[in-house]
Amino acid sequence: MGRFARAIATIVAAAAVALAAAAGQARELRAADTHPEDYPTVQALNFMGRLLRERTQGRWSIKVFHSRQLGEERETIDQARAGAIDLVRVNLAPFNALVPETIVPSLPFLFRDGGHLHRVLDGSVGEDILRAFERHGLVGLAFYDSGARSFYNARRPVTGPADLKGLKIRVQESPLFIALAESLGAIPVPMPYGQVEVGLRTGVIDGAENNWPSYQDAGHFAAAPHYSLTEHTMAPEVVAVSKRVWDSLSTGDQAQLRQAARDSAAHMRRLWSERERAAQAALAKAGVRVTRVDKAAFAEAARPIYDRFLAEPRLKEMVRRIQAVE
Ligand code: GTR
């Protein structure tokens, strides 16, 4: 969207909020998600919309524009900050350059396992990260699961960082992910999610990194069948609402929206673990070649990332708090 179109969209959206509020009418929130309709993130947003509609007697609902209908993740973030989109569900990585606190849970080899991640996100560190969005035009509502991300490629089995050397690996548009791929010897190619499949098929990139469901769902596995279990990051997804929309809500409606998001996150955890298992089984059947890796070697190569991205003491302190969570 051009700047002019965006400005118009913002004015129209703001006017719609004001009118609906004045008339006490029902209002539909527009949510953006890059994934297709049956993906757990989209299903969880639909669930959140159902809860909200029930709990507000139909005053508020959510229409989910899935499958990138409203653009790639970075664009939807910009539009939500401008108030042209109400809700976004994106991974934390595209927020890394904007909201420094999102770097922390995206760091490589930080969480011990999924349980550790959940306890951190459900606790005070999670609260602090969600609150950090407010300085950047959004209000963080809840985290969704995204499992662990691993590297995959079209060329060869990768068991240690040396095997990644020289491979062109697509990463998310995040300085952290670019630096991470570099530290492991790969050539990072930042690119939006929607271009990865063609990039793999045409050889523009040799590989990428993602969780099991995305690797399967986006069809990346067909062109890049070597999946290496690096599980290098557990960067979660976030659901955030435009601050302009948030500020137009009554305190009661704000509480309803936050609660519906939280409840949808609990629902999403169930959907996610089922989907992860199903994707893994389907990929094994499809002939994907899974390689165990020397995780310690990857963690060691990625270690300089910590100093580089934790220059601010408050971020370092957050890492300490995360490590202290049992
Ligand atoms: C997926 C995530 C998306 C997007 C995508 C990517 O796992 O759910 O939001 O971040 O990865 O790699 O761009």
Image: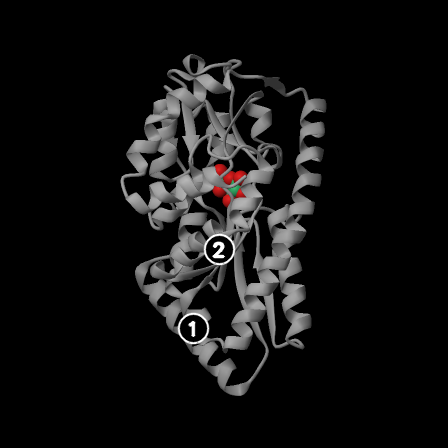
Q: Which residue is mark 2?
A: 70
Type of amino acid under label 1: Asp
Residue 103: give x, y in percent of width and height.
39, 42
Instruction: Look at the image and tell me whether residue 186 can be seen.
Output: no
Q: Alpha-carbon distance for marks 1 and 2? A: 23 Å
Left or right: 47 in relation to 210 = right
Q: Residue at x 32, y 27 (%)?
A: 304
At label 1, counting other C-alpha atoms closer than 10 Å, the crowd grade (few under 14, some 14-19, many 20 or more) is few
In the picture shown, does residue 200 fall above or below 116?
above
Q: Nearer the viewer, mark 1 or mark 2?
A: 1
Q: How is the image coloured?
A: one colour
Left or right: 232 in relation to 273 = left
Q: Which residue is mark 1?
A: 247
In the picture shown, does residue 106 fall above or below 297?
below
Secondary structure under the numbered disc 1 in the rendered image: helix
Q: Residue at x 34, y 50 (%)?
A: 98
Q: Residue at x 39, y 44 (%)?
A: 318
Left or right: 133 in relation to 269 = left
Pick whichever of labels 1 and 2 is earlier in the sequence. 2
Instruction: Look at the image and tell me whether residue 88 can be seen.
Output: yes
Q: Nearer the viewer, residue 89 or 222?
A: 89
Type of amino acid under label 2: Leu
Q: Which mark is residue 211?
A: none
Q: Are marks 1 and 2 in contact (CB under 8 Å)?
A: no
In the picture shown, does residue 323 fall above or below 187?
below
Left or right: 246 in relation to 259 = left
Secondary structure under the numbered disc 2 in the rendered image: loop
Residue 88: give x, y in percent of width and height.
49, 56
Residue 84: give x, y in percent of width and height.
43, 65
Q: Residue at x 40, y 37 (%)?
A: 191
At label 2, counting other C-alpha atoms closer than 10 Å, the crowd grade (few under 14, some 14-19, many 20 or more) is some
Q: Nearer the viewer, residue 161 or 225?
A: 161
